[in-house]
Amino acid sequence: MEITSFVLGMLTIVAVLIVTAIVAGMVKIYKLETETRKLREICVDIETNFGREIEATHRNIQRLDDERSWELDEFKKNVDLRFDETTRYIDSRIDKALGTMGAKQVING
């Protein structure tokens, strides 16, 4: 009977150790699942924020490009205007120097 009691006691201890190991493993798995879920949420937040930042940066680049294009167009218009004014002024000076101003006045009446 002593051997049977000893064997049953040892089996009980082994069973308790196995159950303890299983419970500890289940707790670790639960903690890992919780941590994994939190990390996934963080990754989704980072991805969303990164996408927003990329869109905002793209909009800023587009806005700056539009502003620079507008400034360049205005500069070109200004240069063209100044060129035309300079050409007219030089033309009038040449006409005056050559004495053709009177001829234009006669034609215009």
Image (tube, rainbow, N blue to C red):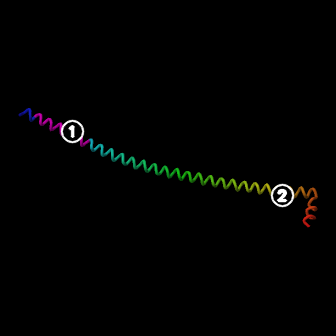
Labelled disc at residue 88: 2
Q: Residue at x 59, y 53 (%)?
A: 62
Horizontally, residue 86 falls left or right of residue 73, namely right
Labelled disc at residue 18: 1
Q: How crowded is mark 2: few (under 14 residues within 10 Å), some or many (20 or more)?
A: few
Q: Which residue is drawn at 80% across and 57% down?
A: 85
Q: Of helix, strand and loop, which one carries label 1? A: helix
Magenta span covers which residues? 6-24
Identify the image quadrant of the N terminus.
Answer: top left
Determine the CA span between mark 1 and mark 2. 103 Å
Horizontally, residue 34 falls left or right of residue 11, namely right
- x then y, percent, for residue 35: 35, 46
Whether 12 is among the magenta residues is yes
What secondary structure is the magenta-colored segment mainly? helix
Q: Residue at x 18, y 38 (%)?
A: 15
* Count of numbered circles in the view: 2
Horizontally, residue 107 falls left or right of residue 53, namely right
At label 1, the amino acid type is Ile
Q: Of helix, strand and loop, which one carries label 2? A: helix
Q: Residues within 10 Å of mark 1 (few under 14, many from 20)?
A: few
- x then y, percent, for residue 94: 89, 55
Instruction: State whether residue 27 is above or below residue 87.
Output: above
Whether 57 is among the magenta residues is no
Identify the image quadrant of the C terminus.
Answer: bottom right
Q: Which tag, 1 or 2, sits closer to the chain's start?
A: 1
Labelled disc at residue 79: none
